[in-house]
Image (cartoon, grey):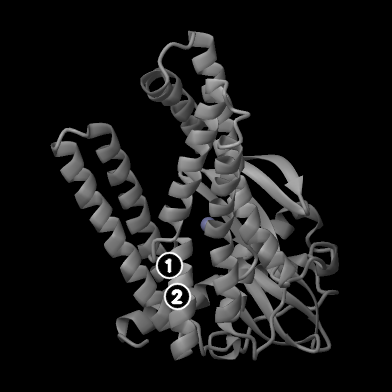
């Protein structure tokens, strides 16, 4: 995620903190030191309030991290690769490299988070009741962490997508109907409904005089509402490509150039005459590279007539797709590597070229025809 700082690597998973989390960290520390602890535990000195608050906020951070690690470690143990964990504004996100492929897996990955928060609450509650905590700042901290972890579990288990509880709900519907799209739709509509409910309740609380908690609830409700909506949009976009093969979108007669041809010829006959910005480089039907306007710009203009295309082209990394590949794979490949075109090959023979413009045209035509 942009704007995040890597702080650790645990079991091969990068752990990063988004800058919004630092802001929340200070806000939590400040509200604990200035309001919550003085009201609940009067009589400490100011430094004790601050030190206790910093420790409590740090342990809150650890609690959120352990919740996310539970998701990630379960996912990893079931063969689902995990890229990273990012802690941000209202919690954390585990970046799985792909969505779980079957409902049973999604269920256990999702439920692992709230269960670990409940386990943490139980541990802090255990420490709390051992009598070791006669010193009141320690008791205050463990009390606070019991509450926080119960709240973390309770909020996350709400059955609205994309919360953990929403994923649990989705996996159950998905398992029962075998239809991922329908399951996501239902779970995210429930998520949006919970979002609206929280906003309404927050407004009501604010009007009833509980301003601070009311505002928090409105913020969280708004966040949940928009997250649910964007999760549904994303899946809609993915389902647009569900049964579309690269072959039906690509240009199957792309202009090509041989690797021995001079750059001058490439510029005149392909870039200028045809108005293109890219050409696959093909020798005897085999794809050997790709050459773009940017590549050519690196060659001095005076040398264009004596420099072969092979000296300007990119040989690797050369991202290609097959005609039978699904379009979502091609679109992801373009986005991930920031390329505007993908040569389409069958056993290194060029059979077409897929450009970003082809993708956009396909989406537009289907949109205008109202086809799904
Ligand atoms: Zn979670």
Q: Tell me: 144 left or right of 13.
A: left
Front residue (pair 93, 107)? 107
Q: Tell me: 91 left or right of 232.
A: right
Residue at mark 2 = 170
Contact between labelled residues 1 and 2, with CB atoms less than 8 Å apart: yes
Q: Is mark 1 within 8 Å of ligand 1?
A: no
Residue at mark 1 = 166
Residue drawn at (56%, 78%), measured in percent from left and top? 328
Q: Tell me: 263 left or right of 172.
A: right
The part of the image, by quadrant, that contains residue 41 is top left
The label shown at residue 245 is none
Q: Give the percent coordinates (x, y) of residue 360.
A: 46, 73
Under circle 1, the secondary element is helix
- Sort mark 1 into few (<14), some (14-19) or many (20+) by Cα contacts within 10 Å: many
Cα separation between marks 2 and 1: 6 Å
- Sort mark 2 into few (<14), some (14-19) or many (20+) by Cα contacts within 10 Å: many
Front residue (pair 111, 352)? 111
Q: Give the percent coordinates (x, y) of residue 106.
A: 56, 73
Front residue (pair 130, 330)? 130
Q: Is residue 371 above or below residue 361?
A: below
Q: Is residue 240 above or below residue 289?
A: below
Under circle 2, the secondary element is helix
The part of the image, by quadrant, that contains residue 56 is top right
Task: Specify whether residue 235 is in view.
Answer: yes
């Amino acid at each position: 995620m942009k704007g995040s700082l890597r702080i650790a690597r645990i079991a091969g998973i990068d752990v990063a903190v988004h800058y919004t989390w630092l802001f929340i960290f200070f806000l939590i520390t400040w509200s604990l030191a200035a309001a919550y602890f003085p009201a609940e535990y009067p009589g400490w000195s100011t430094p004790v309030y601050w030190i206790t608050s910093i420790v409590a906020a740090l342990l809150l951070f650890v609690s959120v991290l352990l919740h996310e690690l539970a998701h990630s470690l379960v996912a990893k143990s079931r063969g689902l690769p995990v890229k990273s964990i990012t802690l941000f504004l209202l919690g954390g996100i585990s970046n799985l490299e792909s969505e779980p492929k079957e409902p049973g897996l999604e269920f256990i990955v999702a439920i692992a988070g709230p269960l670990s928060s409940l386990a943490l609450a139980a541990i802090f509650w255990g420490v709390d009741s051992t009598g070791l905590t006669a010193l009141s700042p320690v008791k205050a901290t463990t009390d606070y962490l019991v509450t926080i972890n119960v709240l973390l579990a309770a909020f996350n288990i709400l059955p609205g997508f994309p919360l953990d509880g929403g994923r649990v709900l989705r996996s159950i519907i998905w398992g029962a109907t075998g239809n991922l799209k329908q399951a996501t739709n239902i779970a995210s509509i429930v998520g949006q409904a919970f979002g609206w409910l929280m906003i309404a309740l927050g407004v009501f609380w604010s009007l009833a005089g509980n301003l601070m908690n009311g505002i928090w609830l409105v913020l969280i409700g708004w966040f949940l509402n928009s997250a649910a909506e964007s999760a549904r949009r994303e899946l809609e976009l993915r389902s647009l490509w569900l049964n579309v093969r690269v072959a039906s979108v690509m240009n199957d007669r792309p202009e090509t150039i041989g690797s021995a041809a001079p750059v001058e010829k490439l510029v005149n006959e392909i870039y200028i005459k045809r108005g293109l910005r890219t050409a696959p480089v093909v020798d005897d039907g085999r794809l050997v590279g790709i050459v773009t306007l940017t590549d050519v710009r690196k060659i001095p203009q005076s040398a264009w007539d004596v420099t072969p295309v092979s000296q300007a082209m990119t040989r690797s990394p050369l991202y290609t797709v097959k005609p039978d590949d699904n379009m979502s794979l091609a679109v992801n490949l373009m986005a991930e590597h920031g390329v505007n075109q993908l040569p389409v090959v069958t056993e290194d023979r060029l059979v077409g070229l897929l450009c970003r413009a082809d993708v956009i045209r396909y989406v537009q035509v289907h949109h205008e025809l109202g086809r799904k």
